[in-house]
Image (cartoon, helix red, strand yellow):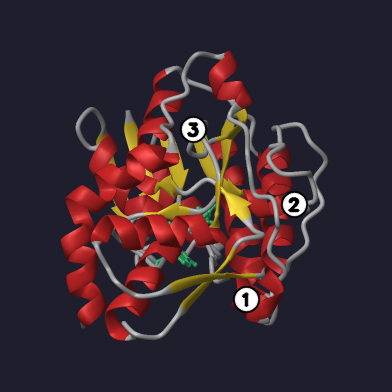
Amino acid sequence: MRILILGGTGMLGSDCKRILKDNNEIITLNKQELDIISWDGVIGAIDKVSPDVILNCVGFTDIDACETENYAVRKINIEGPRNLAQASARFQCKLVHISSGCIFDGRKLIPQPYFEDDALNPQSAYGMSKMESETAVRQNSPNYIIIRSAWLYGINGINFLKSVVKHAVQKESEVLKAADDQFGSPTWSYRLALQIEALLQINARGTYHATAEGCCSRFEYARFILDKLGLKCPVEPCKMKDFNYTAKRPTNCLLENRLLKKQGINVMSHWKKDLNIFLDKYGEKVIKDARL
Ligand SMILES: NC(=O)c1ccc[n+]([C@@H]2O[C@H](COP(=O)([O-])OP(=O)(O)OC[C@H]3O[C@@H](n4cnc5c(N)ncnc54)[C@H](OP(=O)(O)O)[C@@H]3O)[C@@H](O)[C@H]2O)c1
């Protein structure tokens, strides 16, 4: 397959490049080469590249900044995907678009997960923009896969795991606070890239949930990282409200990979298993980078 990866410099996009390059022809265009908010740019680029698949890993992903940067959020998270969806229709290729668990209100009782067909009710500007992006994709592309994920970590990009390590390394004696009332499934972007590959291999269509198996609170997640890396920084549980975030986060961000399992193509692992592998492989690098 000829796959055009957009957002290839980001956390998920860089892992997708790594995974998909073995059995496919990969073309990547960075933001300077193709700004997805430009309709003319998108149409011209897709015409020229003529891909079988457009993989959209682009996003305005700073959840708090989304509350105030309304113009950029609309352009990048909604109009960009709409441009790509229209291009996928015009040039008859598949669009793979990444959405988020933030489209749900997070009020289900823990540990009940959200299913693909549960009602959407985003509580933040980011969640709202991801919900609208899904609508734009469904309305404009006849051949799409929407993949909802959550709590991503990886070796590239900014993520919770790196923030925890940075705190532990730079403020070793200062207590790290992490919420014990917010739940999710820490998901390795590399594993999600493998799942995307599996979906492409069967020429899947539709909306899928794809997160790691099992669940934990932010506090358990932080503790696991520190213990595994032997970092001595003290960690204490707190509540989400203690952080005074600008954007509201879902308390329950658990997504069930129901459709992947039904179709026998779920490659997602338990969060602890993947996090162990990730920290064995990249722990030292993450610590070294955190010292910079
Ligand atoms: N992170 C998570 O926990 C999470 C969870 C669920 C879903 N998602 C979704 O997964 C996708 C990827 O997330 P991520 O965390 O990997 O993102 P990321 O690391 O923030 O990377 C975003 C990418 O988008 C590019 N980009 C931004 N604006 C662009 C534009 N106008 N035109 C072209 N490229 C542009 C960035 O390029 P530059 O680096 O040049 O700015 C970067 O390569 C997003 O749709 C996000 O909403 C993320």
Residue 50 in sight: no
Dot 1 alpha-carbon crowd within 10 angstroms: few under 14, some 14 to 19, many 20 or more:
some
- Res. 64 mark: 1
The one of 97 and 291 positioned closer to us in this rendering = 291
Q: How many marks?
A: 3
| Residue 209 on image: x %, y % | 59, 35
Depth check, mark 2 against mark 3: the one in front is: 2
Name the residue that disc number 2 marks. 106
- The residue that appears at 42% across and 64% down in the rendered structure is 159
- The residue that appears at 22% across and 69% down in the rendered structure is 287
The one of 102 and 219 positioned closer to us in this rendering = 219
The answer to whether marks 2 and 1 mark residues whose Cβ atoms lie closer than 8 Å is no
Mark 1 or mark 3: whose residue is earlier in sequence: 1
Q: Mark 3 is on which residue type?
A: Cys
| Residue 106 on image: x %, y % | 74, 52
Q: Indicate the quadrant containing the N terminus: top left, top right, bottom left or bottom right.
A: top left
Q: Is residue 96 above or below residue 286?
A: above
Tag 3 secondary structure: loop
Q: Mark 2 is on which residue type?
A: Gly
Rounded to the nearest whole Å, what is the CA distance between mark 2 and mark 3? 34 Å
Q: Mark 1 is on which residue type?
A: Asp
| Residue 261 on image: x %, y % | 55, 19
Side of 14 where 223 appears, left or right: right
Q: Indicate the quadrant containing the C terminus: top left, top right, bottom left or bottom right.
A: bottom left
Q: Is residue 278 above or below residue 20?
A: below
Name the residue that disc number 3 marks. 93
- The residue that appears at 65% across and 43% down in the rendered structure is 137
What is the quadrant of residue 161 in the picture?
A: bottom left
Side of 80 where 117 appears, left or right: right
